[in-house]
Structure formats: structure tokens, C-alpha cells
Image (tube, helix red, strand yellow):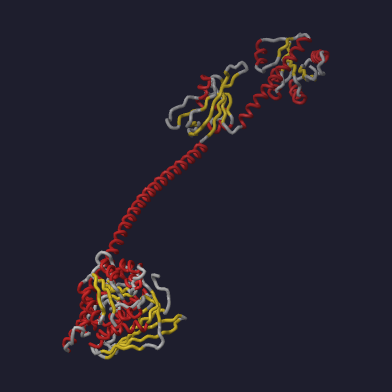
């Protein structure tokens, strides 16, 4: 009771003092007295009493009920009416001002005390309740989600600003409306009305989440995708007294999720496509690898066949060479014994004819060798056997071999050799064959005069070179024909005109063999005067095939 | 000149040519038409020089050369190949098989006699040139 400030509104001074006296004697601080309604409102505003004793019958502009109304509305201070009489009309008016007590005069001190204590207690409880409600409402107002509360009949009792925005209903419009009128929801996909969650939660008594894809239709018809839940509000006895519905706009979230899903789907699609592509490529590759393997297999088989064919060819060439030389041995050999007059003397005619046989047989041998050697060289199967060879002795042997052929045409076959012995490290047979070809060509294309073999050594770029040259006084070769000299099966046009025998293989083969020996063949010629063919070899150098 | 020469050659015409030529130059000629016969003669007769073909029926010239050269006495008799194997590389193969000299067919009679004389004179391994140069 200590500290409760009291305002007494009473226009009769004695009564006011009497009440004041009674209260002080009960231990309350000395109450302030207002003698009119006007004064009461002013003092209430100024002093903020905890309780106001209000006489209903006040003189002046405002009576007690009006004054009480003002004070209650403006300051929220509890009012206790204090009156001498109470007719129904006054009681009815007073009731509307929610008084905290009603004391009829004359009263006892005890009545005052009880009325003050009850009013004070009730007021503070109500204040607590109001504070609690304000706290709750402020909380709901300040959250980012929309919140709507209803009573147990589904009538809206609260809406926060977000709920106003989403539903399009102002608080003033929405309050006391049925929730299903303000909160209209349908399924996004089926467009059917979805059961109102407040009704559902009231029926089931538990927290319920809204179904997915729920669309809220706002007051102006706008559709908003929402997501949320509803829960019951219970009183202290556990009875349901309402529903709180919380929801939020998930359009953006849903859009983002959809975009994410789309991106994800797109990615999956691409991955799938890419995987399919890769698989196709893989498959193709496998196929190609298999084809490649088969091709390689075939190639290997082909190679083996070729190798066999090559071996057969080599064997054939060797046999041909052998078989052709065997009868030539008898022809050249017996012609030789006859020319040596071993069996007896010869007439001039016999000798001439035997020489012709010999020359022809030797020529035939040359052709056979060219053809067979060429075949062997072309198949790349030539083994070289380099050895030191006396150049002079090779030249002398050639002169021995071809001397008769030259002299039978009336041509002198001579040589111009240096005094010092020259040795070259090369394949004997290849060297001999090149020189034989050059000399027999020279004889073939010379009608009169001479064929001369020369030998010299010189230094070129620091290496010793051996040069064999074969000069003739024959028809020579035209500039334009020289390019074709070394082609297989070609003879210069004028050679063909003169009907010279020969396969046309000689120079082609010579160049091939010279290449094999690491040497070169050059031709100098003056048409009508003669030609010189020159073979140049390194005196000593490693040969191919070594 | 003179001397005893064994000729191993299966081709009768070529055998006749060589025999005729050698006899004309006063050599005593022993003939065989296959390798075994030739080796037997070499064992049973005094021989100063052996001329041997390479292509022979049965035992070929390479085997004959190997057999003769393995023998402590017969191995010292000069052994000359007279052969129609005259492609590039043949000469080297023949000499590698143990022949002391190589003469390719067709032979040139005048030159052939000179080559044989030279081998007889040297009584030792040499690498006399072929009949025709190649």
C-alpha cells in the first residue's frame, strides 16, 4: 500500500478531505484532490496517480463518467467510482468506462482499502498483460515473415505489416475478417483451393506446414508463391484459443531454386551429351584401333609375303645369272681355245668369225649382268665388300677384256696412267662394272678415233679423291639429251637413229652403283667431237652398307 | 710348266673345256663330277691344285672347300673356285668359304691359263681375279 499515489476527484470539499483523511490514516501517501473534471484531467496528466477516486456527480462541464473516460483513454489510469446513489442509467454509462471499482456512499474505510488494493493489483496485471501483448505484437511486426493470428474461430485478430503487404489487406480491413477471406491460397500446379491452414491446425491441433507450391492470392488478385506454417495458440489451461500463421514470399527463392535446377539440369544434360559424345568417340576410336590393328596385321602379312617374294626374286636372279653364265662359259671358252689355235691353225675368215662370236658373247654377258644387277640393286639387297683395289690393275683388266671389241671397230683403246700406284678402297665388282660400262659405251658410240682411260688423284675439301675418266672421239651428246642420260631404258635420240645396240641401262646402273660407292659420275661432251665420263671416288671412305 | 690338277665340275661341256685347256698347257688333269668323288681323288692321288665348281650335285663347293681345308695335308693344296656365281658379293662369299682363288664363268681361256699358272707358282692362297672381269 505504501507508495500508491491516489487522486481524489470530488467537488464537495468536506467529503474530499474526509476521504483524504481516511486514506492517510490507512497509511497511503496524502492523496491530491481535484474539485472539477477539468482539474482532474490536468492533475492526472501531471501527477500520474496509480488510482483515481472519481465522484460521478461532478458539477461543471464534465461529470465523473466523462472525466473518467478522458483519464482512462489519455493516461490509462484505473478509475474507482465513488457515488452516493446509483441509478441504472448512471451505472450503465459508468460500466462502459471499465471502472475498477464502484463504491456507494456512505462507505467504510475498509471498503476504500479493498477497492484501492484490488484496482491497483488488477491494473498492474492488466498492464503486464498489455506489455506482454505489445512485446508479442512488436516482435511479430518486426519479423521479416508475414504473421496473422486468429482466434479459435478463425477470425483474424492480428496482422503484421508483411502480412498486409503480401495479402494486400490493411490491418484495419483484415481484423475481424475470416482468415479464409484474407488468406486465400491455391495449389500452383492444380489451381485448386488449398485447405486453409488455420482450419487444419485447429482440427489437428498441431503445427502444420503448408503444402509445397502454395500460391497466395492477394486482395488485388496478385499471385504470390508462399511457404509456411501454422500453429495453435493455447491458453494456460492448454485450450486452443487461436492460430498463428507465419508465411513468406518464396517467389525469389523458388525462382533461384528453379534457375539452379535449370542450370543443374542443363549441366546434367550437357554432361550426358558430352558423355554420349565421348562414348561415341571412344567407340569410334576402338573401331579405328581395331581397324588399324587389322591393317597392321594385313601389312605384316603383306610384308612377310613381300619378303618371301623378294627372297624368291633374289633366288631367281641368282639362278638366272648362274644359268645364263654356264652356257656362255662354253661359248666364250671354246671360242677362246679356237682363237688361241689350240686345236689347230685358222684361216683369216675363221678367225674373224670367231672374234665376232667372242665379241657378241661378251656383249651378251654385259647385258645379262646389267639387267640382273639392276634388279638386285633395285630390290635394295646389294652387299658391298670394300677392299683396297689397285686402280691401275683394274684399268688394265678392262683393256684386256674390251681391247678386241675396240680393235675390231678400228678404234684404239688406250690409257694414260700415272707412275705411282693408286689404291682405292671400294667394292671391286661395282667399280669394275661401272668402268666396263663406261668404256664399252664409249666404244659403242665411237666410229673412229680412240677411247682413252685416265686416272688421277687430287685433293678436294681436304679429302683425297680418285678420278677415273673415259674419253672418246665419238658423236658426243647434245646438251638437251644430257638430262636423260641416266634414266633407265633411255638412249639419246641420235643413238637410236644409228641403231646402236644396248638396253639403255648402262648409265642408269652406273649412277646407282656410283651412289652406292659414295661417288659420282659426271659427263662432259661436245656434240660432234666426243664425250668424257668421269667417275670420282673417295680414296678411302666408309661405304654404305658397312 | 706342268703339274697335277684335279677338276671337280658337274657340267660335262665345261669340264671338257677346262680339261682341254689345261691339257693343252701340259697339265695332268684328274676329273670328278661331284664333291665326294673329288675329295676321294684328292686323298688317293697326288694333286698340286684343285679347281672346283660351287654348284655341284649333293655336296656343294662350299662344303668341299670346308672339308678340304679342315684336312692337315689337303688343306695346303691351292683351291680355285671356277663358278658361274658371279653376282655382286659372290666372290667374297666364295673366298670366305675357304677357296684360295676365285675365277668367274665365263672364263677367258688365255687369261685363265695365266691365272692358274700364277696360283701354281705361288703355291699359296691368293685372290686371283675372275675370268671375265665380273
Q: How many marks?
A: 0
In the image shown, does A304 or A104 lie closer to the viewer? A304
In the image shown, does B75 or B134 lie closer to the viewer? B75
In the image shown, does A266 or B101 lie closer to the viewer? B101
Q: Position of residue B35 (x, y in %)?
A: 27, 67
- Judged left or right of residue A259, residue A277 is left
- Relative to A364, residue A95 above or below: above
- Judged left or right of residue A487, residue A178 is right
The residue furthest bottom is A449
- Relative to B100, residue A500 above or below: below
Q: Identify which residue is drawn at 68% across, 23% down.
A: A73
Question: Image quarter for residue B25?
Answer: bottom left
Q: Position of residue A500 (x, y in %)?
A: 22, 82
- Relative to A56, residue B70 above or below: below
Q: Is residue A373 visible?
A: no
In the image shown, does A199 or A285 lie closer to the viewer? A285
Q: Classify the position of the C terminus of chain A by image quarter.
A: bottom left
Amino acid at each position: 500500500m505504501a507508495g500508491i499515489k491516489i487522486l481524489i476527484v470530488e467537488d464537495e470539499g468536506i467529503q474530499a478531505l474526509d476521504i483524504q483523511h481516511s486514506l492517510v490514516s490507512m497509511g497511503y501517501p496524502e492523496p491530491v484532490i481535484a474539485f472539477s473534471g477539468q482539474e482532474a484531467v490536468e492533475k492526472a496528466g501531471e501527477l500520474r496517480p496509480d488510482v483515481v477516486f472519481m465522484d460521478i456527480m461532478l458539477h461543471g462541464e464534465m461529470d465523473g463518467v466523462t472525466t473518467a473516460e478522458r483519464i482512462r483513454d489519455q493516461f490509462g489510469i484505473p478509475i474507482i467510482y465513488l457515488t452516493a446513489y446509483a441509478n441504472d442509467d448512471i451505472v450503465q454509462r459508468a460500466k462502459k468506462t471499465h471502472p475498477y471499482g464502484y463504491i456507494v456512499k456512505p462507505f467504510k474505510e475498509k471498503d476504500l482499502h479493498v477497492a484501492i488494493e484490488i484496482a491497483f493489483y488488477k491494473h498492474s496485471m492488466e498492464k503486464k498483460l498489455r506489455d506482454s501483448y505489445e512485446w508479442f505484437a512488436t516482435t511479430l511486426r518486426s519479423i521479416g515473415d508475414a504473421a496473422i493470428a486468429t482466434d479459435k474461430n478463425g477470425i483474424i485478430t492480428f496482422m503484421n505489416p508483411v502480412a498486409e503487404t503480401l495479402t494486400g489487406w490493411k490491418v484495419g480491413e483484415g481484423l475481424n475478417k475470416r482468415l479464409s477471406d484474407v488468406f486465400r491460397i491455391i495449389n500452383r500446379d492444380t489451381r485448386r483451393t488449398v485447405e486453409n491452414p488455420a482450419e487444419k491446425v485447429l482440427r489437428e491441433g498441431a503445427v502444420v506446414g503448408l503444402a509445397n507450391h502454395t500460391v497466395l492470392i492477394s486482395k488485388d488478385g496478385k499471385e504470390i508463391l508462399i511457404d509456411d506454417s501454422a500453429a495453435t495458440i493455447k491458453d494456460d489451461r492448454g485450450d486452443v484459443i487461436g492460430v498463428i500463421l507465419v508465411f513468406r514470399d518464396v517467389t525469389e527463392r523458388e525462382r533461384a531454386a528453379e534457375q539452379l535446377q535449370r542450370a543443374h539440369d542443363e549441366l546434367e544434360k550437357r554432361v550426358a551429351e558430352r558423355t554420349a559424345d565421348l562414348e561415341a568417340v571412344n567407340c569410334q576410336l576402338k573401331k579405328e584401333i581395331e581397324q588399324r590393328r587389322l591393317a597392321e596385321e594385313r601389312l605384316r602379312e603383306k610384308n612377310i609375303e613381300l619378303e618371301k617374294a623378294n627372297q624368291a626374286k633374289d633366288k631367281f636372279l641368282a639362278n638366272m645369272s648362274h644359268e645364263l653364265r654356264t652356257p656362255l662359259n662354253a661359248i666364250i671358252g671354246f671360242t677362246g681355245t679356237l682363237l688361241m689355235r689350240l686345236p689347230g691353225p685358222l684361216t683369216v675368215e675363221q678367225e674373224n668369225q670367231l672374234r665376232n662370236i667372242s665379241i657378241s658373247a661378251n656383249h651378251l654377258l654385259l647385258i645379262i649382268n646389267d639387267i640382273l644387277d639392276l634388279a638386285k640393286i633395285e630390290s635394295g639387297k646389294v652387299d658391298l665388300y670394300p677392299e683396297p683395289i689397285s686402280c691401275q690393275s683394274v684399268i688394265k683388266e678392262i683393256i684386256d677384256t674390251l681391247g678386241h671389241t675396240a680393235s675390231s671397230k678400228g678404234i684404239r683403246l688406250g690409257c694414260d696412267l700415272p707412275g705411282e700406284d693408286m689404291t682405292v678402297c671400294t667394292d671391286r665388282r661395282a667399280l669394275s662394272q661401272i668402268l666396263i660400262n663406261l668404256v664399252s659405251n664409249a666404244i659403242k658410240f665411237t666410229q673412229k678415233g680412240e677411247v682413252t682411260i685416265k686416272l688421277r688423284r687430287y685433293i678436294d675439301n681436304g679429302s683425297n679423291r680418285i678420278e677415273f675418266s673415259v674419253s672418246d672421239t665419238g658423236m658426243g651428246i647434245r646438251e638437251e639429251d644430257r638430262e636423260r642420260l641416266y634414266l633407265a631404258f633411255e638412249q639419246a635420240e641420235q643413238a637410236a637413229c644409228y641403231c646402236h645396240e644396248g638396253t639403255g641401262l648402262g648409265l642408269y646402273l652406273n649412277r646407282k652403283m656410283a651412289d652406292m660407292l659414295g661417288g659420282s659420275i659426271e659427263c662432259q661432251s661436245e656434240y660432234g667431237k666426243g664425250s668424257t665420263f668421269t667417275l670420282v671416288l673417295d680414296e678411302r671412305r666408309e661405304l654404305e652398307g658397312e | 710348266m706342268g703339274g697335277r690338277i684335279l677338276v671337280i665340275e658337274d657340267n660335262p661341256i665345261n669340264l671338257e673345256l677346262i680339261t682341254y685347256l689345261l691339257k693343252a698347257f701340259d697339265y695332268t688333269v684328274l676329273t670328278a663330277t661331284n664333291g665326294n668323288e673329288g675329295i676321294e681323288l684328292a686323298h688317293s692321288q697326288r694333286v698340286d691344285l684343285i679347281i672346283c665348281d660351287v654348284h655341284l650335285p649333293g655336296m656343294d663347293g662350299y662344303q668341299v672347300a670346308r672339308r678340304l681345308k679342315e684336312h692337315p695335308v689337303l688343306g695346303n693344296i691351292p683351291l680355285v673356285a671356277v663358278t658361274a656365281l658371279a653376282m655382286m658379293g659372290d666372290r667374297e662369299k666364295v673366298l670366305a668359304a675357304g677357296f684360295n682363288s676365285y675365277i668367274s664363268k665365263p672364263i677367258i681361256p688365255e687369261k685363265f691359263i695365266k691365272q692358274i699358272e700364277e696360283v701354281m707358282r705361288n703355291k699359296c692362297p691368293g685372290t686371283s681375279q675372275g675370268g671375265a672381269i665380273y
